[in-house]
Structure formats: C-alpha cells, structure tokens
Amino acid sequence: MGFKSDLLICTTLECETKEEMMASMEKAKQEGANLVELCIHSLSFSHISEVEELISHRSLPSIVSFSRSKGKLQSKKTWLQVLKLALEVGVEFVEIDFEEATDDVIAELMNKRSNSKIIISSYLNGGNPCKEKLGNLIIQLQFTGADAIKLDMDVAYITDVAPIFHILTHCQVPLITKAVGDRGLISQLLGPKYGAFAVWGSLSHKSVPGLPSLLSIKQVYKLEYMTPDTKVFGVVSNPVGHSKGPLLHNPAFRHTGYDGIYVPLLVDNIKEFFRVYSCSDFAGFSVGIPHKEAALGCCDEVHPLAKCIGAVNTIIRRPRDGKLIGYNTDCEACISAIEDALRERRITNGQASHASPIAGKLFVLVGAGGAGRAIAFGAKSRGARVVIFNRNFERAKALASAVSGEALPYEYLNTYRPEKGMILANASAVGMQPKIDQTPVCKESLGSYELVFDAVYTPRNTRLLQEAAEIGAIVVSGVEMFIRQALGQFKLFTGGLAPEEFMRKISPKFNSFLINDNEIRTQLELR
C-alpha cells in the first residue's frame, strides 16, 4: 500500500474490538490521515487470526504497535507472534519499544520482513531533558539499526519543545517526535519545518492534549506545504484556544503566496519564551491574555501608541537586527469599527459629518485588561467621556486615571443610566463560550445606549448583542474588531498589504472549522 504524500499524517487508534478499529480507520481516512497506528494491545481478541484479518483488511497504510506494558495480553510469546504476523502480512511499519528491542528480537524481525519498516520507540516521562541527554538517547535508538525511530516525551512548558526541533534537524535516520500535553502542540504543527517526516493528529471525536485534529492539519494548517524556510507566527497566550487567528492568518498567507504558518502558543512565562525561541524563523506574534502588559518589557522597541496604552497585542522580530518591536492594533480596530457603525446610521438619517461620532459621547467600558486599555485610550483620543467598570476596582481606577476618565464600582453597572445615547463596550470575558447565557448588562439597562459593542467573538452573536439589537441599539460584533486588528497584524507580519476582501470572505466560515478544544483553549483577549 503506497503513499500519495511526502508528509505522513497519522493518528493512533486504540479500540477494544476489531470492528471499532476498522470503523475508526475509515474515519481517520475521511479526516485526512494517510497512516494509522494500530495499537494491538488495546484489542480484545480470542485468536490471533482476528489480528491477521484486521491487518489484512486495513484501509490505510499502518503502523502495528503492541506495547507489553500497556497490553491486556502481556506474554512475550504473544507479543512477538503479533509483530511477526504483521511483517508476514506486509504491514508498512512495525513499532517496538526500546526496552524490548534486544539484538535477538530485532534480528528475528528483520529476517521476517520483506518491505516492512521497523520503528524503535522510547517514552520519556517527566523532567526537562537537555539537548545532550536527548542526543544520547537518539544515538542509542539509532544504534539498534531501526529504519525509523520514535520519541514521545512529556513537556511541562512550551520551551521544553525547543530541543525536539534541534534533534529533528540533526537526526541521521527518520525521526518521529511527539510532545505530550497541551504545551506540546507545536511539536506537530512545526515539526515538518525541522525535518519531521510524519505528524500525529487526533480524530475529531477523540481529542488528545498536544495533538492537532486531523481536520485542522488538512484544512487549516496544510502542513504538507511547509518548508524549512517557512516563517513562524502565532498567538502567545494562556489560555490560548478558540482563537480564530489560525483560521484567518493561515488561509491569508496561502492566498497571498506568503510562506508562513500561524499557530497557537500556550505560554506560561513570556520572557522565557522569547529567550528560547529567539531565532529569526519565529518572526511575529499576536499577544493575548495575560501577557499584553508584560510583553512591553520583552520588546526592544515599542510603538508610541502601544507605549501610551501600556499594552501590546503584536510583536514583530525585525529582520535586519532581530529586535522585538511592539505594536497595538486593538485600539484602532475597535474604535474605527464603532465609528463606522455610527457613521452609517448618521448617513442613513442624513446626518453625515467628518468629525468622530464618538466625540463628546459618554463611553461606558466594561473591563480594564489589555483589550480594555486599548479601547479606553482609543475612545479618549476621539474625545469621548470614558467611564470604566471592572470587577477589580483598583484596576478600573488606574485606567480611568490614565485616560482622564471615571471609574465606578462594578455593581453599579446595571443601574448606571445618567443619559440617553451612550456607547457601551464590553472588553470582559462575560458571555464567552461556554458561558454564553451570561451578559455584563441586563436588557432593561440597554435602552440608554445608542450603540453596543462586544469584544467577545465566540459566539459571534453574544447574548449582549442579541438583547441590544432587540431594543433597537446599533450592535458591533467582536468579529469586526478581530478582523480589523488582524488586518493590521497581517501587514506588520508580512510587510505588505493584507487581503481584506479575502479575509472578510472567510470569516463567516470560522465556525465550520473543527479544531479540538484541548489543542486550543481560550478566554478573552487572546488576540
């Protein structure tokens, strides 16, 4: 059974019955896999002929693995019998644990095979192995004479993945690597750039921490097109999921012919992240919660607007000297979206004006985080009167002082109705998935607002926006802010114009892409 792609896209199948294994294999094929790992140790079978039937009727090229440490049948005789049978049937790969790979076993299997390849695998549990330790283990695996070697390892931080890229680049035989855990996701998404010949994904109904879904590999990231020269971009956040960034930037890169990939980066320590991933290949970053303010200290230079706001949502590694330059595209994205919506209503009513429609307005802001700061400074720059509500009142007061505004206790938000025609901007996480039944302001209080903006964009139409529309207010979705700030980021990432028409065209399709919740987790401000 041959391969149609240079990059192998694999998923691991652990099923109790032969029928379930066959059904899962067919589903993997439908979702884009061109290779599956058949974990025989997970099967319940009464006779080895059932295993032979499974392998013989496989619908995809396969790796047959049988871990004695995990298996229900632990005898060495059965283990060896299964592996020899797989070779006799002509399976593409047989995988053996390094601990079981004695010279005698390898010699016996080598003599049994015809065109099958043998993979020797090892699992590192815990710790933070350095390049030297990993290098020594790789040498031992290579010394077995295997056709390919496989290394699975736990990672506690995203920076633990960096040595994997190093050994991928320098390994003398084909190497499969998997970094286990949420912070290991980039080991698969960026592996092909560093020479990985196979990547692992998960089935859409069986998400696995640290693995992208098969569908996202094929539909969103298209890893088969990655080259050693591909530039890496991503969203640095914690948590970092439901980000629509990969769904927008990756198709835009391909549309413009730019050799780049945009990935989720689950980062705990932003300073350590930039210290470890300091090469020019890591070219640009969106910055999200909770790093927008701390990111200022990681930048060599900061754009004046971002410095004034005190938060950056975009960092570019300047090609000529490698310095990190910080920007804020949130501010203009939000304020221009609100202005355009107000102007459209004014034009409809025959009240067009060149002045900002925000000028003089009472601008009520909920939230004082990174996105809230950008919106507050933007509103101030247009001449609005800014009033800030935040659960942490001290943060609200500090931001209000910075924009010559006013801070009020959060519990007063629903009763705050000093005048008609106000603007409401929600920059908190209230109403975001999965808590879509929540809203920061009750429907009864929305009658005082001419326009309501919600920075939350998952879901696209939040309860706040639904209720605001019902009482006749102008509503502006967080999707509009997201697209506008992404357009600004794309220009900074590529040094060219962003394909606005294309990016707007694909944005309604966000919800049709299936990306595992485990691979990308979220809250507000992940942009």
Image (cartoon, rainbow, N blue to C red):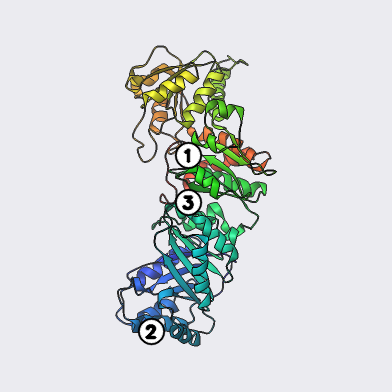
Mark number for residue 158?
Answer: 3
Residue 423 appearing in the image = no
Expressed as whole percent of the image width and height from the top left, the position of residue 342 reads: 53, 21
Expressed as whole percent of the image width and height from the top left, the position of residue 514 reads: 46, 51
Q: Mark 2 points at which residue?
A: 81
Q: What element carries label 3?
A: helix
Residue at the spot 41% in from the left edge and 49% down from the top edge: 517
Characterize the local packing of mark 1: few (<14), some (14-19) or many (20 or more) Cα atoms within 10 angstroms.
many
Residue at the spot 49% in from the left edge and 27% down from the top edge: 373
- Closest to the observer, 222 or 19: 222
Which is in the foreground here, disc 1 or disc 3?
A: 3
Mark number for residue 137?
Answer: none
Report how far apart the C-alphas of labels 1 and 2 lie in the structure.
51 Å
- Closest to the observer, 389 or 120: 120
| Disc with the residue nearer the chain's start (3 vs 2) | 2
* Disc 1 + disc 3, Cβ < 8 Å: no
State which quadrant residue 411 falls in.
Answer: top left
| Disc with the residue nearer the chain's start (1 vs 3) | 3
Going by the numbered disc 1, the residue's amino acid type is: Leu
- Closest to the observer, 8 or 324: 324
Report how far apart the C-alphas of labels 3 and 2 lie in the structure.
40 Å
| Disc with the residue nearer the chain's start (1 vs 2) | 2
Residue 300 drawn above or below residue 156: above
